[in-house]
Amino acid sequence: MHVRGRRLLVCNCEKTMPLDSEELSRAISAAGGEGELNVHSQLCRAQLDNFERALATGEPLLIACTQEAPLFAELAEEENSEADLRFANIRENGGWSEAAKQAAPKMAALLAAATEEARPTPLISLKSEGVCLVYGKDERALEVAHQLKTRLDVTVLLQSGADIIPPRVMDVPVFQGRIVAATGHLGAFGITVNDYAAAFPSSRQELQFDLPRNGAFSECDIILDLTGDAPLFPAGERRDGYLRPDPNDPIAIQRAALAATDLVGEFEKPIYIRYDEEICAHGRSRKTGCRACLDHCPVSAISSLGEIVEFDPHICGGCGLCAALCPTGAIEYQLPAGATLLNQTRTLLETYQKAGGERPLLVIHDERHGSEMISMIARFGRGLPARALPLLVNEVTELGFDFYFDALAWGAAQIAILVGPEKREEVQGLATTLGLIESVMDGLGYGGGRVHLLDQQDPDAVEQALWTLPAEPGAAAGSFLPMGGKRARTFLALQHLHEKAPHPIDILPLPQGAPFGAVEVDTSGCTMCQACVTACPAGALIDDPERPWLGFVEENCVQCGLCKTTCPEKVISLEPRINFTDQARSPRELNRANPFNCIRCGNPFGVGPSIERIVNRLAGAHSMFQDNRQVERIMMCDDCRVVVEFEGSTAAITYGQRPQMRTTEDDLRERELERARQRLAEAGTEE
């Protein structure tokens, strides 16, 4: 059988999955599959020759097994096969479940989603020479250093007050000190140390150290932190090259030491973030607008450059919070790049519903926590419900409002997010986003409770939650493609949700902080200076070069507040909301004014309210504008102002004879003449 151009190989894993070949074939065919389905029982063992024959055809293959993916890939390499292999997990995700016999639509969806092409992620290089700092408080630091000395260039730094018997052979350098500042990443760490001192080689009963000094600086490639104190870096577990095991857990220490030995050489790290500064709403003209990425980056990999921000890809841990919270789409997550994940989600939901599935529950999970949780549920519990569609992502925190609206518009009835213990604090940063999703769905009549955070650590509790989530119907599935940027994709979904809503509403109020809304201007105080137009990063505020006019395109507004902050008259206010009418996509007038005509020549040269405001403020109140003639010049165009200035000038411009140029010789000549006169005068006095 073929699925979207790939030859499909399915195995029931020694009949541990009750696969009904006819039912599965029907579900796959309903979703676009072609041909006859052959279900294997031992594809990775007794029936391995079937895989080899399929490999020999050179066709792209889709193998419904992820456990034995390394074996299949190794065989393909041995055969020098150029066949493109893809793998899909239908066992833990569907076949090992009480609802396995009803899971054919889900399996068809998982297989179809696995065929989506993934755009490659750009990479950056990190280089480590193996210079390792072991930072500790007691003998454990020395013990680990002795283990690593043959593999790494090790130095030990002990905090002051450590009572340690000197080693018989000082085969690793030992120093005392406390790290007060640390920067960098794998291959390029920099540390600042106070109370820094070298150990005396003559230490007898306990280590003695030289006179300490502060502000010592050193560099290293790897830091193994055994102090048990607060981490040297924010979200230290995400800092490449920084290892911080529990000093009271010997197994954790050994794992960290083993990991340190592997951190030598040149490594490639994904560049998780693509940044488009042209549509960034961080700042304009020294005014600050959006700070979502700066305020929520757990590793402090983002810094402000005034109007834009800067990312350090060496430090970035790839959590994706910045991309999820960015209101404009200036920050895009790149693992995988482009719209790959959205295409997979659309295919997953669309195929499931075409194959006869109803009320899909999209289960978002990562590899470290989520996949393990699903595996435990499948092996020791009831497994996943038939309507639960697992979607593997790199980080559960990478998804923004565009993804959730798109998924709901493609027919997802509910969305469950499996959150690991290390993600709890980061997920809190998405509270505004998830609140926005609930507000919109509830406001349109779909009801709340569409997005669920499952942060339980007990697989039984997660299983119970998944099986008991309400199977309420979602929106009628849309078929739109995830085209355009973040906001374009979002409005495609919102328009579909509005069209199919049980209780559509044209203008839906939103809570403060929402990235959608309107701008209102108090026209009585607006001078049409157009500073707000210059400040707007999203093109929501517009002007007309032919006339004093201020317009607004609501769909473009991200509610960053730069217009409000920049406005010198403070007449701008923000209103968070979603306008579903056509007016949101068209310019509407906020203010207009008549041009001011020059009082001398009659030609228009400025905005009426602005000129009038300037006259009212300066006339009689400024030393340069005390009489009517001076005030009238404000109400003249540039040309007339110059003419009047010269007409009223009392200083005649004359062109006399050019003064004769003087040189140094003229000065010397005059000096000699003066000396000669003095000599003559002195001679006459003597006679």
Image (cartoon, rainbow, N blue to C red):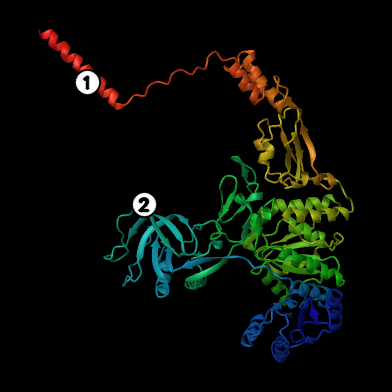
Quarter occupied by the C terminus: top left
Position of 191 with respect to 3 (left or right) is: left
Q: Where's residue 288, x and y in %?
A: 61, 42
Residue 672's mark? 1
Quarter occupied by the N terminus: bottom right
Query: The residue tagged with tag 1: helix, strand or loop?
Result: helix
Q: Say which of marks 2 and 1 sits in front.
A: 1
> Disc 2 residue type?
Asn
Residue 57 versus residue 477 in the image, above or below: below
Query: Real-space Cα distance between discs 2 and 1?
Result: 69 Å
Residue 48's mark? none
Position of 244 with respect to 5 (left or right) is: left
Give the quadrant of residue 362: bottom right
- Asked if one can make out residue 382 in the rendered structure from this viewpoint, the answer is no
Residue drawn at (72%, 48%), measured in percent from left and top?
515
- Sequence-wise, which precedes: disc 2 or disc 1? 2
Residue drawn at (14%, 9%), measured in percent from left and top?
684
Query: The residue tagged with tag 2: helix, strand or loop?
Result: loop
Q: Where's residue 264, x and y in %?
A: 47, 71
> Disc 1 residue type?
Glu
- Asked if one can make out residue 131 in the rendered structure from this viewpoint, the answer is yes
Give the quadrant of residue 111: bottom right
Residue drawn at (65%, 36%), measured in percent from left and top?
566
Residue at image mark 2: 214
